[in-house]
Amino acid sequence: MITQQFKKHLERQMAEVKAAGLYKPERVLGGPQGTRVRLADGREVINLCSNNYLGLAQHPEVREAAKRALEEWGYGLASVRFICGTQSIHKQLEERISRFLGAEDTILFSSCWDANGAVFEALLGPEDAVFSDELNHASIIDGIRLCKAQRFRYRNNDPADLEAKLREAKDARFRLIVSDGVFSMDGYILNLPAVCELAERYEALVMVDDSHATGVLGRAGRGVEEHYGLSGKIDILTGTLGKALGGSSGGYAAGRKEIVEWLRQRGRPYLFSNTVAPPVAAGALKAVELAENGLALREHLAKLAGLFRRELERLGFDLLPGEHPIVPIMLGDAALSARYAEKLLELGVYVVSFGYPVVPKGKARIRTQMTAAHTEEDIHKALEAFAAAKRELG
Ligand SMILES: Cc1ncc(COP(=O)(O)O)c(C=O)c1O
């Protein structure tokens, strides 16, 4: 039974969050995901805050594939994979992702959150050690919490600090280094060559969550490995179907076949959670094909990101350096950042302000993301709004 005391406790916490400008309201959309979105009040605004990097969430071929699957395979399977939740489209999708990424095998999960939640507990025991970048996604942090391995957190993208930690754990039975391929709040790209070099010297497994890189980086969209011209270096590659690969839901772990086979036996979110819905599996199959053949989309996306960065800097905004279509505009103060987001929405551009605890205190920002479906005209319109907001808010 909920007590008055507990309700008061929640109210107090909530009041603190609101007073600090850290409350996260949910914007209700009145239509589908796209370069422009319709708000609940009917207004259309330019959307610069989705992960729909290749613009495939509304792609006619993806929608058609999902519709056909709905008729052919049904709406849902009401089962986990190992009971009666595996259709041939699930196997096809796993094989297709393996082929796309150059991996030996792939296992699907309901989300990348679940993929990251499955890996550590299934693979590592108390005799082992895991080394995690300090800016890793929350799903990696929580996944690590579920396992009993020794934990080492190293400074963001800092090989010297990683090496110091690897030395500390020389006696561990197995070592695993884990990092985001692209750090989602900053748009920084992992220094994969340095990680792989250390992994070889210290006999560590390499795991990368490439959720923001798959489909986006590399000529064929294979992500951070291809970005550096490497292949076969990553032992476990997790990713999402919820961003560049169609923007729906679902995730996967791809990599060495022995690891994937073990995850099918011991990955708890795989064993105890429902299978990916058939229309989603079929839509993702089509999205992977479009992503693999999406060089023109990636080139357009990179051009837009370059244009947006250059012009924002010319307007005097403080950006984190980078080349990814995640473009963070640093405002520092969470309340100011929130005011900017509100003003920009008034001016017809939808962006979101991020404050603590999503980013460190004093490093509030507006994280913008563009998609390959945007046009240069969209970006220029957005820039006009940023200029106007700056004139008003400073
Ligand atoms: C780096 C990273 N990993 C994992 C996830 C979770 O992906 P999913 O939405 O498939 O659970 C996200 C999504 O925010 C992410 O940015």
Image: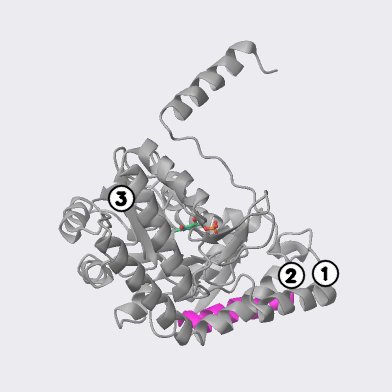
Q: Nearer the viewer, residue 60 or 262?
A: 60
Whether residue 146 appears in this view of the structure is: no
Magenta stretch, main secondary structure, is helix
Please name the amino acid that badge 3 sits on.
Answer: Met
Find the distance from the CA under tag 1 to the CA under tag 3: 46 Å
Residue under the point 48% across and 61% down: 48
Q: Is residue 88 magenta?
A: yes
Dot 1 falls on a residue whose secondary structure is loop
- Image coords of residue 88 (percent x, y): 72, 78
C-beta proximity under 8 Å, tags 2 and 1:
yes
Residue under the point 53% across and 61% down: 47
The disc label shown at residue 330, or none: 3
Nearer the N terminus, badge 2 or badge 1?
Answer: 1
Vertical side of 293 occupied by 63: above or below: above
- Residue picked out by circle 2: 278
Q: Quadrant of residue 275?
A: bottom right
- Residue picked out by circle 1: 74
The mark lying in front, picked from 2 and 3, is 3
Dot 3 falls on a residue whose secondary structure is strand
